[in-house]
Each structure stands twice: as C-alpha cells, then as structure tokens.
Image: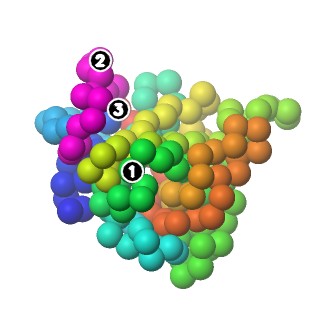
C-alpha cells in the first residue's frame, strides 16, 4: 500500500505544479495515477496511530520547494474507515517527530520569519483533507512564504476535526507520519 501511495502522491503533486489538474470525478473510487517527475521529499506512514479505528490507514507525503522558495506539500491518505467517508479532517505539519504518545509531535510548525501579528493560517502549514468514498483523500498546499532552511518541521498529523481557521485547533491527533522538511529539495 505504501508504494502505491508514494507513487500517487509524487505523481499528482508534481503534475499539479507543472500542469493544470482536471477536476476529479465527483465520486472516484481510487486515487488518480500520473507518471512521476523531478525531485521530491517523500514519506510514507503513518508511523504511529493513536486511535485504533484508523489502524488500516496509509499516508504518503510529498514536499518540495518551488523556484520562489515556497514549500508545496501534498498529503494522500487511503484505507480510512467507512465512518470517515465524507468527513473532513485537519492535517497539519508539526514541529517534532512522531512518537508513542500523540503529544510527541509537539506543536504545529510555525514560520519563524513570520511578521508579528500575521494570521495563524499564514504562519502554519495546513492540509485539511476530505475523505472520499473508497476511504481515500488528497490535499495540497503551498506556503505563502519561502520555507526557511533548517525549518523545524518534522511530521504531519491527521486530526479528528477540520481546522478552526481562527485558532488552528483541529481536535484529537489520530495518527502521525514522520517527514523531515528541514531542508526540502528544490524544483523548477
């Protein structure tokens, strides 16, 4: 499952950054397949599951820096339980690596160069994902800022609720995938 997720995430991410992405079928049963290109940072997981209802889920994360230094991150999940179909989950980049407890990943990554008073959505990396029929989903975001070298960003956590746009809260941590974004490869 992990190699499929990795191939799909890499292909879709890179294709999406280099060419327009057609609108998906309203109820596709599986992630789209596209040929991979260029450099990327890829992680498969999750390494830690904190809610056993999600024990069969698999993730793939692709991340890279574009020509302006902005980070693009794509999150793909599959194997989500039927109870998750149609729901949206908060997905955030966290500062620390995943560990035995949900708190191990620490707080959300926050851009250390963000101007004082910047909105939380402009400082953090959010990848909220809607789970489609078949138990899979995909999301993508590009930061509004150049990702600093050595960024303290080491994991991606899927949360129980959609992200509150005012506070950044998304509820309980369901599972966590390690991915070191401290020195992202560049494309373009």
Q: Is residue 176 magenta?
A: no
User: Which one is closest to the eye, mark 1 or mark 3?
Assistant: 1
**Spatial CA span between label 1 and label 3:** 34 Å
Mark nearest the camera among 2 and 1 is 1
User: Which residues lie in the magenta part?
Assistant: 14-31
Q: Is residue 99 found left or right of 63 in the rendered image? A: right
Q: Residue at x 58, y 65 (%)?
A: 173
Q: Residues within 10 Å of mark 1 (few under 14, many from 20)?
A: some
Residue 151, given in percent of the width and then of the height, sits at 59, 50
Residue at x 44%, y 63% (from the top left corner): 177
Q: Nearer the viewer, residue 157 or 159?
A: 159
- The image quarter in which residue 55 lies: bottom left
Give SS at disc 2: loop
- Mark 2 or mark 1, earlier in chain: 2
Q: Are marks 2 and 1 in contact (CB under 8 Å)?
A: no
Tag 2 or tag 3, which sits nearer the N-term? 2
Q: Position of residue 114 (x, y in %)?
A: 74, 36
Depth check: give the residue in front, 137 or 155: 137
Taking the spot 39% from the left edge, 36% from the top edge, the residue there is 186
48 vs 79: above or below: below
SS class of the residue under badge 3? loop
Neighbourhood count class around disc 3 (C-alpha, 10 Å): few under 14, some 14–19, many 20 upward:
some
Report the disc number at residue 115.
none
- Residue 187's label in the rendered image is 3
Please check the rendered image and state whether residue 24 is part of the magenta-colored stretch, yes or no: yes
Of the numbered discs 1 and 3, the one sitting upstream in the chain is 1
Categorize mark 2 by other alpha carbons within 10 Å: few (<14), some (14-19), many (20+).
few
Q: Quadrant of residue 64?
A: top left
Residue 161, position in %: x, y? 59, 52
**Image disc number at residue 20:** 2
Tell me what residue is drawn at x 59 percent, y 79 percent.
Answer: 101
């Amino acid at each position: 499952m992990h190699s499929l997720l990795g191939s799909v995430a890499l292909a879709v991410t890179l294709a999406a950054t280099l060419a327009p992405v057609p609108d998906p079928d309203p109820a596709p049963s599986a992630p789209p397949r596209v040929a991979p290109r260029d450099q990327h940072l890829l992680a498969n997981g999750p390494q830690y599951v904190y809610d056993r209802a999600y024990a069969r889920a698999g993730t793939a994360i692709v991340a890279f820096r574009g020509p302006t230094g902005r980070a693009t991150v794509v999150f793909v999940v599959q194997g989500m339980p039927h109870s998750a179909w149609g729901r949206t989950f908060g997905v955030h980049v966290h500062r620390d690596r995943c560990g035995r407890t949900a708190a191990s990943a620490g707080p959300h990554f926050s851009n250390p160069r963000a101007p004082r008073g910047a909105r939380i959505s402009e400082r953090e990396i959010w990848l909220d994902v809607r789970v489609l029929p078949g138990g899979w989903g995909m999301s993508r975001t590009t930061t509004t800022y150049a990702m600093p070298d050595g960024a303290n960003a080491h994991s991606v956590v899927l949360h129980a609720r959609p992200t509150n746009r005012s506070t950044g809260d998304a509820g309980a941590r369901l599972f966590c995938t390690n991915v070191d974004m401290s020195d992202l490869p560049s494309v373009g």
